[in-house]
Amino acid sequence: TAAMIERRDALLGPAYRLMYEHPLHIVRGEGVWLIDPEGRRYLDVYNNVASLGHCHPAVTEAICRQVQTLATNTRYLHNTILELAERLLATVPETELAHLMLTCTGSEANDVAYRIAQVRTGGTGVIVTETAYHGFTDAVSKFSPSLGVTVDLGAHVRLVPAPRLYHAEGADLCERFTRDVEVAIADLQRHGIKPAALIVDSLFTSDGILPEPAGLLKGAVEAIKRAGGIFIADEVQPGFGRTGEHMWGFQRHGVIPDIVTLGKPMGNGQPIAGLLATAEVLAEFGKNSRYFNTFAGNTVSCAAALAVLDTIEKEGLVQHAARVGKILREGIAALADRHEAIGDVRGAGMFVAVELVADRTTRAPDRELTTRVVNLMRDKGVLLSACAMGHNVLKIRPPLVLTAEQAGMVIETLDAALTEAQSAKAR
Ligand code: PMP
């Protein structure tokens, strides 16, 4: 491995990062498993791209069939993209979302969404949560504070606190979030900046996975619309059934977005992302701009995305995510009796957060312990990672097909890793 890391650093340069103290060399994926060259199997509970499981046969078959028939762009008539648009739009009947535009990455989807918002509103102001991540392009990185010191936020960007229920003792978070967005809007206006959009990941993934309270976004969405801006739901993480409730995360908040951005699990590994937008929001942009993206919406990616939608339905993965996600959450919550470091366990469906604290009374983050646990889990064969401002929230985001038995393995391994990490600390 050491030689490979050295070769990689030499070839790819200094901007790339590997996960884990002992980086993994992976040669194969199968369902919830990643397999190294020696045949050791790692339970992957972190990969929300291979949401149906690695190399799902329905998707690989759809890709193979299409790549052998025709791999080309959106400048010809072809049924796959039309069928995909119909199928995706059918998931949001309660909205006025009417069009699908395709990109290759979630970053591009948010970049295009922001351009549409600017044309629509005549403004540039953006409101996001304090540790949000929305992508890597120049425009989007300026409203992705989780990039930290590596990128300066734009002067047109305002941050609002994420709804950290565990740290909020009895506060009305709906009211507080609405007020914070209103304050951000007023501050933009005071600086002569017209608000263009409120962009929110409805599970607040980078902020620490904060699903509660449901309904939180209602007042904030009304506020941005009143101010002439639009609401963009970033569904790159919560989308495609992960919450175990609906297809999309915004649905748990009872709000109607003007644009919904999609990505990660959309092609189960095939690069495809995009956005759904209302006719009203897109009208002006479409009049003045031509949209073409060489690879986005290619026939092969569309075939993969159609197979993903079929499989979610056929295998009942939304309901499955709810059932097994609950087992996972409750099993981990039960570990709190034995492990003082577990401050909070929360989540929705197949997205679970475990907040590790140095002290349950102060709820101070234990970043060091969290990093230790992530690495111990990897050494014990379970792959996960951490997020949030204090970098003290274990992020568990398995493929939706995780079984109850495999959830049991995650719980058992976490129990062992916490015991080992804490005894190392005591020494
Ligand atoms: N939005 C959210 C909420 C994300 O988590 C990510 C990726 N982590 C992106 C957008 C960007 O997607 P991509 O990496 O495909 O550009």
Image (cartoon, helix red, strand yellow):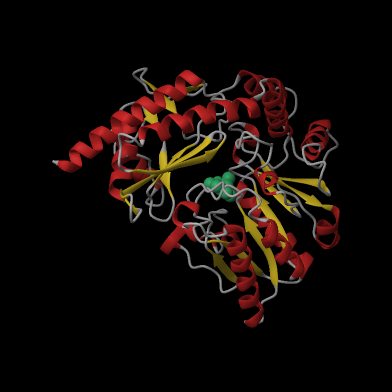
188 shown above or below 386: below
Estimate the x, y position of residue 233 in percent, counting from the top left: 67, 52
How many numbered marks have been drawn onto this rendered protein structure?
0
Farthest residue to the front: give it: 170
Name the image quarter holding the N terminus.
top left
Residue placed at 37% from the left, 48% from the top? 392
**Direction from residue 162 to residue 92 in the image, left or right:** right
Considering the image in quadrants, where does the C terminus appear? Answer: top left
**Image position of 272 with respect to 26: above or below:** below
Residue 218: image x %, image y %? 69, 56
Which of these two is toward me, 206 or 149? 206
Vertical comparison of 257 with 318: above or below: below
Query: Where, by quadrant of the figure, is residue 53 drawn?
Result: top right
Q: Position of residue 155 (x, y in %)?
A: 56, 74
Relative to 88, does residue 280 appear above or below in the rendering? Answer: below
Front residue (pair 48, 339) = 339
* Residue at 72% over, 37% down: 298
Is 279 situated left or right of 310 in this image? right
Residue 98: x %, y % from top left: 84, 47
Q: Nearer the viewer, residue 364 or 361?
A: 361
254 displayed left or right of 375: right
